[in-house]
Amino acid sequence: RLHAYVACMLDSPLPSTIFWGDDWTIMRNDIPCPVPRPSLAQPLVPSHKNPNGKGGAQVYGDAWEEMLAILSRVMSSCSPLSSPDPTLMRVPLLSPLSSGPSSPSYASRYMRTTYATLPRDDGTVGGVLLQYIDVTDSVLASTR
């Protein structure tokens, strides 16, 4: 099943991350996304430019305990979890003119996060899918 989950995540138009297994191995698609601090409105800058294949604690560092609490809550409830309100986050932008890993440009966007469990072949929960949904346009429209 993990192969199918990864294939779907890679094809998704949404910024997505899978946390899988006992060490919460990270698999992420290439769509720029913040790595949030769950209890803060600012994104955590990952300690690795490419977190794929690394454990969650290694990538999230000091913020891992916060993220682990959310992932554990999703896994124990076996039901999806969405952020109740959009969070203003700084999202890295891809520039068509950039040709290397220079300092990225950022945009402020309102993002809603969703978490869903991913079952293993035996039916037990093997991981969690985290996706970001950009709701900036609807948030701004509701303030007009």
Image: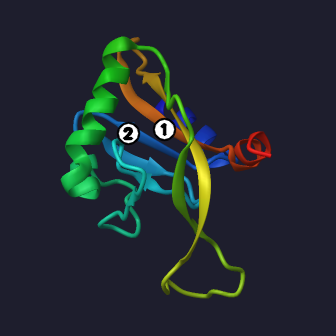
Residue 50's x, y, as percent?
Answer: 41, 65
Establish if 31 lies above or below 93.
above
Q: Where 129 sits versus 78, above or below?
A: below
Task: Answer left or right for 16 relative to 77.
Answer: right
* Left or right, residue 26 beside residue 56: right
Decide which of 15, 134 is in the foreground and name it. 134
- For disc 1, the neighbor class at 10 Å (few under 14, some 14 to 19, many from 20) is many
On residue 130, the disc is 1
Q: Is residue 39 above or below residue 107?
A: above
Q: Secondary structure at mark 1?
A: strand
Q: Which residue occupies the foreground of this view, 12 or 120?
A: 12
Q: Is disc 2 surrounded by few (<14), some (14 to 19) or many (20+) residues within 10 Å?
A: many
Comparing labels 1 and 2, the label whose residue is closer to the camera: 1
Disc 1 marks a residue whose amino acid type is Leu
Which mark identifies residue 30?
A: none
In x, y percent, where is residue 11? 67, 46
Question: Dividing the picture into quarters, in which one does residue 105 lie?
Answer: bottom right
User: Residue 52, how many percent across, how many down?
Assistant: 40, 56
Residue appearing at x 30%, y 34% in the figure: 21
Residue occupying image coordinates x 36% and y 13%:
77
Q: Residue at x 35, y 53 (%)?
A: 53
Colour scheme employed for the rendering of this structure: rainbow
Q: Residue furthest front?
A: 144
Marked residue nearer the N-terminal end (1 or 2): 2
| Residue that appears at 48% across and 51% down | 28
Residue 107: where, in percent of width, then height? Answer: 61, 67
Q: Are marks 1 and 2 in contact (CB under 8 Å)?
A: yes
The quarter of the displayed image where residue 22 is located: top left
72 shown above or below 136: above
Local secondary structure at mark 2: strand
The residue that disc 2 covers is 19
